[in-house]
Amino acid sequence: MSEQTKSKPLIRLENVSKSYDGGKTYAIQNFNLTINQGDFVALLGPSGCGKSTTLMLLCGLYRPTEGNIYFGDRLVNNVEPKNRNIGMVFQSYALYPHLSVYENIAFPIRQQKGVPKNELDRRVREVAEMVKITELLDRMPGQLSGGQQQRVAMCRALVKNPNILLLDEPMSNLDARLKLEIRDEIKKLQADLGLTSIIVTHDQDEAMAISNKIAVIDDGIVQQYADPNSLYDMPKNLFVASFIGSPPMNFLEGEVEVFGDKVKFKNDQDDISLPLAMVDVDRLTSSKVTLGARPHHFIFYDDQDVPGNTVRVHVEYVEPLGKELLLKCHSGTTPVRILSPLTDREFEGKDIRVGLQRSMINIFDSETGENITIR
Ligand code: ADP
């Protein structure tokens, strides 16, 4: 697919809100989202944040209370689901138990009426081949494993050549290993077909692995919409920072003061000097800030050689992860998780001083939660 086709907006949500109780509370509020042709977008957030509501609005089972949804230039607010050319895969595969795999896949085409038998057969076999389940076509759903059922559900969603594929937590009923396998298959299939796809998930690992853009949602509001690396490196606020990344980002509370071309971060434990150019001090609403550092953004020194500008932590215990150690520490009363490549050093029970990779840390205004780091 050419870059030009790829970057064309296919789906636009403009100030879309949905309320179930006549406007008293909103399941989603003021959603703005542009999804380009060929994108694989994840709607990511905790349970109840509004992911399924958004998906239902896209497939046409719900209508927006306010705002507009466009597919290309076409306003689809009131377009029936069957006229939206969307394929859907659900968490509960929703296969018809009394129909064979072949008939389950053929079902959406049979509903179209008037499709010749040989054309129907061609399409069922083509899609089964694509998802590699041709040998299962004669089986009944009850004779399939969870992974196989999910592949059949994929075929059923793809058989009508949809413009858009919607996936609602499609892997949540699968065990951990199969999840990874199906995840790779879906990703490859989506890329091969160049099919604009939207997946709902509460699993940040899954969203990071499978999609090229993620909308992080909390409390019915899109907190940030960006590619996985941007979300990871430059989360827009404390919610996104704490939701993305595993082990999660560490947060140290403190106060800042400007001294010349430096910003001094200070709390009961530490005193860290940062370049003024790194912090957008105009956006500070008070002196209170939260310093965010990912577990692998710490620097280790030899005991006799520790410079200033470090964080003091007590290492409670150590989890060996093979190529690195996960140090479970405290800075004062704040838990801190640090990854260390120094697998043969004794850390457990010790007080250590570690540096920060300053170009990688994030500074948040503690009152607003907004990221005020300048990169
Ligand atoms: P998610 O999929 O992220 O778990 P939902 O979209 O299902 O979130 O729900 C968002 C909010 O809307 C929740 O507070 C939920 O209780 C509410 N909600 C969802 N569906 C309905 C409904 N049919 N009637 C009333 N409230 C609903």
Image: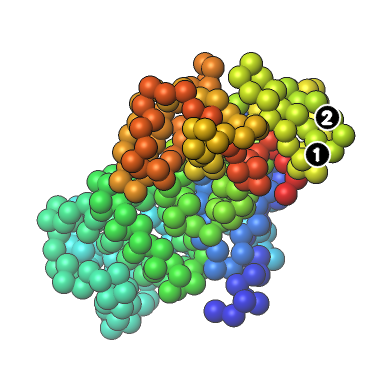
Please tell me the numbered disc located at residue 371: none
Residue 163, x across and y down, in percent:
51, 68
Q: Using the image as rendered, state which of residue 144 and residue 258 is in the foreground.
A: 258
- x 27%, y 61%: residue: 152
Q: Do the numbered discs 1 and 2 sit on residues whose CB atoms are within 8 Å?
A: yes
Q: Is mark 1 within 8 Å of ligand 1?
A: no
State whether residue 265 is above or below residue 123: above
Q: How many marks?
A: 2
Q: Amino acid at mark 1?
A: Leu
Residue that carries the numbered disc 1 in the rendered image: 276
- Which sits earlier in the primary sequence, circle 1 or circle 2? 2
Q: Nearer the viewer, residue 335 or 341?
A: 341
Label 2 C-beta lies within 8 Å of the nearest ligand 1 atom: no
Relative placement, left or right, of 78 versus 200 is right
| Dot 2 amino acid type | Val
Q: Which picture quadrant has residue 159?
A: bottom left
Q: Nearer the viewer, residue 75 or 26?
A: 26
CA distance separating discs 1 and 2: 7 Å
Residue at image location 53% in from the left, 29% down from the top: 353
The circle on residue 258 is 2
